[in-house]
C-alpha cells in the first residue's frame, strides 16, 4: 500500500569495499559523509563489514551510525558493471557527528543510474534543430561556441557575451569549476555582463560587511554551542542549515553545552544555557522548535518587511546608551574617524533615545520593549561584568532584503559595536545557503557604489535587448531570478526569433556553417543565443540553442568549504558521469583552449594570451592553478585578517584526501618559520581586513519608505497582501534532484502558499485548496496551507519549485548600491483557484509544519 | 477480510495511477515481502479513536503502535479504512516517536510523520518515511493482524535480519 517502492533490507559492504570521504552536496552546514562502493554481486556480513559496525543487533538510538533506505543505490560505471553505493553520514565529522538532514539523507538516491529515477540526466551536448534537440559531439559543440564567441567579440565587443554562472561550492564543483569559469569569462572573454546564479549581477551579497573589513564567514561551529546568545536574523536555520541548528544551536538552548562553556570561558565567568533571538516576520519551525525546547530563552521579533536596518540601529542605540560596549576595543580596533559618521547617521545621537525608539517602533512595527530586550540579550554584560558572547547570523531575509547594503552594514556594525566578533562564542556573518568555493581572477566591479561599483544588471541588459550570447551554468533563472515571468517571456521571444531565422532554408549541419548563420541572425533579428550548461534539462534550457551536459557531485573531484567553519575538504569522485558529460571546468577549458587556438591561428597574440593557462589535465591541476590567486600566505597568526577568507594556498587534493572528514579551515596559513599548513578557527581576533586593520564604520541611510516598484501597490486594494518567500526543509534549490525522489515530490508536490487563518476566512481558503497569487509583475498558482506561521496581511510562498516560480510576482528592484535584488518582498492579490485541484493533494500531508506540540 | 484490503489496494492504486499520469514516475505498489509473521494485535472493538495501542512487530525489539484515526488513511483497514500501524522508531536516528494530532513526533530533532499519509516525513530531518505495518482485518471477528512491514525499521540491516 506504499505510495512508492519501499525496501525492507539493505546490502552490506564487504570489508574491502572502496571507501571515499565526501561532504553533502547541499546546504551550508556541509555535513561529512563516508562513501562505500562495492560490486553488486558481493556482500559483507553482519559481523564483518566495511562499516565496522555489528549489524546483527538492533542499533541504539542516536548511535551516530545510520543506514536508511534512502542511503543506498546501485550505480553502473563506465566499465558497464554494477556497483552498490552507500552514502553514510560521518560520525567522525565534528560538523555533523553522524547527524544528517532530510536533504542530505537522500544523497545516494541522486546518483546517476541508467534505468532509475535519475535516468533523465543530460548525457550529450544537445543542439536545437527543427524544434527538437539532437545530440552532437563535444568537438562540434565546442567549435560552435568558440566560433560564435570569437565572432561576437570581434564584431560587437566582449560585452555581447553575457553569462549567469554559479560561484559556489558543494553541488557545483567548488574551487575547480569556479577557477575554470573565472579564467574563461573574467580573464579571457572579459565581459562586464557577468551574473551569479540567483541574482542579476556579479556581486557580493555582503559588501556592507566586507567593506567594513569583515568577511561574513568569521566564526566556527563551536561558537554556536558556546554563545550566550545566538541571533538568527532572516535566517531559518532549522529548515535551511539543519544540522548546524540541531548539532550546534540546539544543544546550547538545551543547556547541554554548559560544560564546554565552562572550559572555554574566563575563570569565574557565568555559563548557562543560551538564549536565542530570532528575527523573522514568520513564526517558522526554527522558532517553534526553539520554543518547544525552552520558550523562556526565545525572543521572536517580527519586523515589517524591509525595515531590519532600522531595527539593528535601534538595538545598537540602546546598547550605546547603556554603555554596553568595550571602549578600549572601539578605540584600538576600529576607525574613529568613520565612527563619527556612524554615531550621527546610524545611532542618531542628536535624537533622544525615546524619540529614536518611538520612531523605530513606528517604522519596524517592533515594540520598544522587544528592542530593549534584544539589546540586553545581545550586549548587556553578564554578572561580574563579563562581556556577553553573541553570535549573530543573517541570511536571505537580510541579504535579499530591500536596501541590501545598509541592512548588512547595520547588523555588522551592531556586532562590532558590542565586540561580538573575534572572541570565543561570538561572530557575525552569514548562515549561508550553499557551501562556498570561490577562487577567480579579479571581477570587473570590485565593490559597491562606495568601492568602484555598482555592477551591471545583466537581467535588465538582456531583457532590454542587449547581448548576443547568454551562457547559463548550473542555475535556472526562469525560476530563480527576480521578476522571472517577464524575464522568461523576453528571453523566450529573443530565442524564438533566433531559431525562426535559423530555420528559414534549413539549419546548417556543419558547425562552421551553423555558426555563420547564427551570426547572420544576430544582424537580422534581436535574437539571443542561449547556452545552458547543467546536469538536467532545466526550465531555461527549453529556450536554449545548445545544452552542455555537466558532471555532478561525486562524478569529479571537488573541493569546497562549508559556511560555519570554513572547513575545506575533498568531495571525492566515486562514480562516473552519465554519457559523455564533463566537469564544468573541463567544458570551459575546451572552449577557452579553442578560442586561444582560433586567435593564435590569425596571429592575434594578445587575444590568444587572454585565453591561455587553461590547459589543465586533471582536477588537481585546476585546484593548484587557482591557489596562486591568493598571494602570499606565509603570515603569522596575528596577520590572518590579511588573508582571503577561502585562501588554501599550499593545500593539495592529496593532502585533503589524507585529512578526510577532518579537513582544514581556511584561510590556511603557511607558518613563516616551519612552512607548516595551519588553519584558522575564528577570524578577526587581532585585526580586521582593511588596509590599516581597523574596522571601517559607515553611516546608514534614514528610512525613506519603499521603492517605486513596490510602493505602487501600497494602498491599492487589488493587492492587499504583503508577500515574502523562503525555502522548504525538504528540497534543495529548484528541486533538480528532488523532483525525481518520491519521498520529496510526494511531500512537496507543488509550489505552496502559507495563509494566516484570519486571511483564509476572508479568502474562503482551506489547506489543500489552490490559490492564484498575482500582481502587475505576474502570477503563479500555489497549493494553500493555512498556517499561523504568517501574520494577518502577510502571505508566504516557497520561492520556487520544480513546477513553478513565485518570483513571477517579485519586482525588478535592486539596491542601487550593490545591484542586489529584493527577492523577499512585494505586495500581491490572492484569489481562490476554482479549477480542478492537482491530484497530488490526495497524498500530500496538509499538517502544519511549524506545530510540534503534543 | 482480504476483501477490504483489496479495496484499499485499489483505492490507493488509483491515486497512484493519477500521479503516474501527471508525470511522477516510480510510484509503484510494493507487495509485502515474504517471511513476515502473521500476528494478532487486537480487535477493532477495543480501539479508541486517537489512542495508540503499543505492541512489537515483527520481533520484540521493534516497538510499534496501532491507531484508529478519525478519517480514512492510506493503508488503513477496517470498515472505515482508518486503522493504521507504524514502527515507533524514528527513521532519522532511532529515537522513539509519540502520537498526537494526526502525526508521530520525534523530540530528538523534531521529525514529524503524517499517519494518514503513509507515514510521510512532512517536517524534520528524517529522509526516510517511517515504516508502516501492513495490517489485515477480519470483518467477521473484528480482529486486526500485522502481516508485514513496508519500509525499513530504523537501526537494522533488514527487518527480519536480527540475530
Ligand atoms: S544539513 Fe545540509 S549539509 Fe547537512 S545533510 Fe542536510 S543538506 Fe546536507
Ligand atoms: S531521531 Fe528523530 S528526528 Fe532525529
Image (spheres, coloured by chain):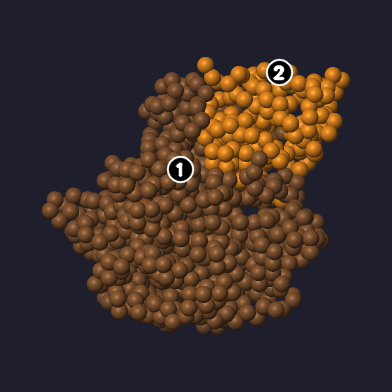
Chain colours: A brown, B orange
> Which residue is pictured at 67% across the width and 22% down the height?
B55
Residue identifier under label 1: A255
Q: Quadrant of residue A854?
A: top right
Point out residue B65 in the picture as x, y percentages from the top left corner.
68, 28
Chain bearing tag 2 is B
Ligand 2 neighbours mark 1 (CB distance < 8 Å): no
Point out residue A485 in the picture as x, y percentages from the top left corner.
63, 70
Is there CB contact under 8 Å for labels 2 and 1? Answer: no
- Tell me, for residue A716, which label it has, or none: none
- Mark 1 element type: loop
Point out residue A108 in the picture as x, y percentages from the top left corner.
50, 41
Whether residue A605 is visible to the viewer of this picture, yes or no, is yes
- Mark 2 element type: strand
In depth, the one of A538 and A789 nearer the eye is A789
Labels 2 and 1 within one chain: no
A660 up-or-down from B43: above or below: below
Mark whose residue sits in front, 2 or 1: 1
Instruction: Mark 1: give few (<14), some (14-19) or many (20+) Cα within 10 Å.
Output: some
Residue identifier under label 2: B39
Amino acid at each position: 500500500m506504499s505510495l512508492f517502492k519501499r525496501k525492507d533490507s539493505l546490502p552490506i559492504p564487504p570489508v574491502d569495499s572502496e571507501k571515499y570521504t565526501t561532504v553533502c552536496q547541499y546546504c551550508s552546514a556541509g555535513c561529512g559523509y563516508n562513501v562505500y562502493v562495492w560490486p553488486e554481486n558481493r556482500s559483507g556480513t553482519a559481523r564483518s563489514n566495511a562499516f565496522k559496525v555489528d549489524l546483527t543487533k538492533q542499533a541504539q538510538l542516536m548511535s551516530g551510525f545510520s543506514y536508511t533506505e534512502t542511503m543506498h543505490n546501485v550505480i553502473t560505471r563506465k566499465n558497464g558493471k554494477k556497483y552498490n553505493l552507500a552514502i553514510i553520514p560521518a560520525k567522525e565529522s565534528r560538523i555533523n557527528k553522524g547527524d544528517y538532514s532530510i536533504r542530505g539523507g537522500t544523497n545516494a538516491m541522486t546518483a546517476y543510474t541508467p534505468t532509475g529515477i535519475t535516468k533523465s540526466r543530460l548525457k550529450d551536448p544537445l543542439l536545437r534543430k527543427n524544434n527538437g534537440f539532437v545530440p552532437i559531439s563535444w568537438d562540434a559543440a565546442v567549435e560552435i561556441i568558440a566560433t560564435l564567441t570569437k565572432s561576437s567579440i570581434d564584431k560587437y565587443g566582449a560585452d555581447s557575451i553575457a553569462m549567469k554562472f554559479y560561484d559556489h561550492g558543494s553541488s557545483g564543483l567548488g574551487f575547480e569549476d569556479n577557477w575554470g569559469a573565472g579564467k574563461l569569462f573574467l580573464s579571457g572573454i572579459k565581459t562586464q555582463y557577468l551574473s551569479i546564479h540567483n541574482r542579476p549581477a556579479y556581486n557580493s551579497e555582503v559588501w556592507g560587511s566586507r567593506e567594513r573589513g569583515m568577511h561574513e564567514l568569521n566564526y566556527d561551529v563551536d561558537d554556536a554551542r558556546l554563545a550566550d546568545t545566538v541571533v538568527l536574523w532572516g535566517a531559518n536555520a532549522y529548515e535551511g542549515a539543519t544540522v548546524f541548528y540541531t548539532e550546534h544551536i540546539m544543544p546550547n538552548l538545551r543547556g547541554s553545552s554548559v560544560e564546554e562553556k565552562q572550559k572555554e570561558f574566563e575563570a569565574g565567568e557565568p555559563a548557562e544555557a543560551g538564549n536565542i533571538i530570532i528575527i523573522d516576520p514568520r513564526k517558522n519551525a526554527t522558532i517553534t522548535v526553539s520554543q518547544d525546547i525552552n520558550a523562556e530563552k526565545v525572543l521572536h521579533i517580527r519586523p515589517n518587511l524591509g525595515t531590519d536596518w532600522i531595527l539593528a540601529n535601534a538595538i545598537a542605540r540602546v546598547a550605546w546608551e547603556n554603555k554596553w560596549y568595550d571602549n578600549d576595543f572601539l578605540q584600538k580596533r576600529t576607525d574613529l574617524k568613520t565612527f563619527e559618521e556612524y554615531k550621527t547617521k546610524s545611532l542618531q545621537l542628536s535624537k533622544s533615545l525615546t524619540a529614536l525608539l518611538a520612531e523605530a517602533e513606528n517604522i519596524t512595527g517592533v515594540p520598544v520593549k522587544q528592542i530593549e530586550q534584544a539589546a540586553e540579550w545581545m550586549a548587556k554584560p553578564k554578572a561580574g561584568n563579563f562581556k556577553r558572547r553573541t553570535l549573530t547570523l543573517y541570511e536571505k531575509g537580510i541579504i535579499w532584503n530591500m536596501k541590501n547594503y545598509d541592512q548588512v552594514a547595520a547588523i555588522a556594525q551592531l556586532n562590532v559595536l558590542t565586540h561580538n566578533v573575534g572572541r570565543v562564542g561570538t561572530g557575525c556573518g552569514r548562515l549561508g545557503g550553499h557551501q562556498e568555493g570561490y577562487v577567480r581572477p579579479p571581477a570587473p566591479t570590485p565593490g559597491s557604489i562606495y568601492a568602484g561599483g555598482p555592477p551591471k544588471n545583466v537581467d535588465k541588459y538582456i531583457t532590454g535587448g542587449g547581448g548576443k550570447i547568454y551562457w547559463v551554468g548550473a542555475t535556472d533563472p526562469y525560476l530563480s531570478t527576480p521578476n522571472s515571468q517577464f524575464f522568461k517571456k523576453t528571453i523566450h521571444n529573443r530565442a524564438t526569433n533566433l531559431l525562426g531565422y535559423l530555420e528559414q532554408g534549413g539549419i546548417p549541419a556543419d558547425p562552421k556553417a551553423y555558426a555563420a548563420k547564427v551570426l547572420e541572425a544576430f544582424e537580422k533579428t534581436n535574437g539571443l543565443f542561449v547556452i545552458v550548461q547543467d546536469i538536467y534539462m532545466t526550465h531555461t534550457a527549453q529556450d536554449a540553442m545548445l545544452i552542455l551536459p555537466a558532471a555532478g557531485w561525486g562524478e569529479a573531484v571537488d573541493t569546497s568549504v562549508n559556511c560555519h567553519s570554513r572547513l575545506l575538504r575533498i568531495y571525492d569522485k566515486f562514480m562516473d558521469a552519465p554519457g559523455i558529460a564533463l566537469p564544468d571546468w573541463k567544458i570551459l577549458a575546451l572552449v577557452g583552449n579553442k578560442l586561444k587556438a582560433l586567435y593564435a591561428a590569425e596571429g592575434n597574440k594578445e587575444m590568444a594570451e587572454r585565453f591561455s593557462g587553461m590547459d589543465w589535465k586533471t582536477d588537481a591541476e585546476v585546484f593548484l592553478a587557482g591557489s596562486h590567486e591568493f598571494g602570499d600566505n606565509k603570515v603569522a597568526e596575528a596577520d590572518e585578517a590579511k588573508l582571503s577568507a577561502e585562501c588554501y594556498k599550499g593545500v593539495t587534493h592529496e593532502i585533503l584526501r589524507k585529512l578526510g572528514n577532518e579537513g582544514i579551515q581556511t584561510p590556511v596559513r603557511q607558518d613563516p618559520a616551519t612552512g607548516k599548513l595551519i588553519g584558522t578557527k575564528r577570524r578577526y581576533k587581532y585585526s580586521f581586513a582593511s588596509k590599516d586593520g581597523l574596522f571601517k564604520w559607515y553611516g546608514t541611510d534614514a528610512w525613506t519608505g519603499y521603492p517605486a516598484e513596490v510602493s505602487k501597490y501600497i494602498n491599492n486594494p487589488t493587492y492587499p497582501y504583503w508577500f515574502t518567500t523562503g525555502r522548504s526543509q525538504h528540497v534543495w534549490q529548484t528541486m533538480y534532484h528532488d523532483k525525481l525522489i518520491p519521498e520529496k515530490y510526494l511531500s512537496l508536490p507543488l509550489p505552496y502558499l502559507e495563509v494566516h487563518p484570519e486571511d483564509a476566512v476572508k479568502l474562503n481558503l482551506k489547506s489543500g485548496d489552490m490559490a492564484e497569487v498575482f500582481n502587475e509583475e505576474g502570477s503563479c498558482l500555489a497549493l494553500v496551507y493555512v498556517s499561523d506561521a504568517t501574520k494577518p496581511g502577510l502571505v508566504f510562498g516557497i520561492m520556487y519549485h520544480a513546477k513553478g516560480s513565485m518570483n513571477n510576482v517579485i519586482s525588478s528592484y535592486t539596491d542601487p548600491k550593490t545591484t542586489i535584488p529584493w527577492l523577499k518582498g512585494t505586495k500581491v492579490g490572492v484569489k481562490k483557484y476554482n479549477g480542478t485541484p492537482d491530484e497530488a493533494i490526495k497524498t500530500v500531508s496538509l499538517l502544519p509544519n511549524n506545530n510540534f506540540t503534543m | 477480510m482480504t476483501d477490504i484490503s483489496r479495496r484499499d489496494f485499489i483505492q490507493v492504486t488509483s491515486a497512484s495511477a493519477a500521479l503516474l499520469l501527471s508525470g511522477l514516475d516510480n510510484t509503484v505498489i510494493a507487495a509485502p515481502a515474504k517471511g513476515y509473521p502473521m500476528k494478532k494485535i487486537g480487535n477493532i472493538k477495543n480501539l479508541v479513536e486517537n489512542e495508540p495501542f503499543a505492541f512489537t512487530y515483527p520481533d520484540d525489539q521493534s516497538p510499534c503502535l496501532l491507531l484508529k484515526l478519525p478519517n480514512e488513511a492510506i493503508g488503513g483497514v477496517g470498515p472505515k479504512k482508518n486503522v493504521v500501524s507504524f514502527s515507533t522508531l524514528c527513521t532519522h536516528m532511532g529515537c522513539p516517536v509519540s502520537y498526537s494530532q494526526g502525526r508521530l513526533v520525534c523530540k530528538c530533532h523534531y521529525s514529524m510523520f503524517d499517519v494518514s499519509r503513509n507515514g510521510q516525513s512532512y517536517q524534520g530531518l528524517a529522509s526516510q518515511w517511517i515504516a508502516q505495518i501492513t495490517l489485515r482485518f477480519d470483518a467477521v471477528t473484528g480482529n486486526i493482524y500485522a502481516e508485514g512491514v513496508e519500509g525499513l525499521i530504523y537501526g537494522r540491516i533488514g527487518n527480519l535480519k536480527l540475530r
